[in-house]
Image (cartoon, rainbow, N blue to C red):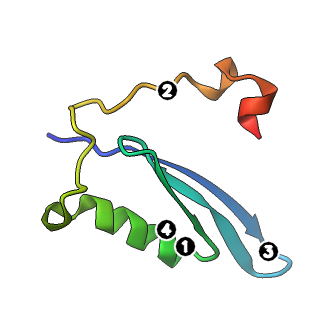
Amino acid sequence: MDYVTFVVRIRLDERHSMSEGQITHVASQETSYFRDLGAAVTFMEEHLDPANGRAGDGGPWGHYHPPMRDASETDRG
């Protein structure tokens, strides 16, 4: 089984009925910013489609990134 890893940050604002965030494909470190969840889904689908040559993480576990609890305040944004 192949694993594809994404890191997603979503900000939901119920008051203004909007969502925005960023999604990163871990293996390629390609990041996309979105203002609706449909754009995030499209980004994932593009990376999961083997026809475009970007599918997968390269290895069964992808790249290792330490948990956020180990990150500095600067890294957390």
Label total for image: 4
The residue indicated by pointer 4 is: 40
Work out whether 30 lies above or below 49: above
Q: Earlier in the sequence, mark 2 or mark 4?
A: 4
Q: CA distance from mark 2 to mark 3?
A: 31 Å
Find out whether the residues at labels 1 and 4 contact each other: C-beta distance under 8 Å.
Answer: yes
The residue indicated by pointer 3 is: 14
Q: Residue at x 64, y 75 (%)?
A: 35
Q: Secondary structure at mark 1?
A: helix
The residue indicated by pointer 2 is: 65
Find out whether the residues at labels 4 and 3 contact each other: C-beta distance under 8 Å.
Answer: no
Instruction: In the rendered structure, find residue 37 and report the number of the disc placed on it.
Output: 1
Q: CA distance from mark 2 to mark 4?
A: 21 Å
Give the class, few, some or many, for how many residues have Cα within 10 Å of label 2's Cα (few <14, many ≥20).
few
Amino acid type shown at disc 4: Ala
Q: Secondary structure at mark 3?
A: loop
Q: Which image quadrant: the N terminus?
A: top left
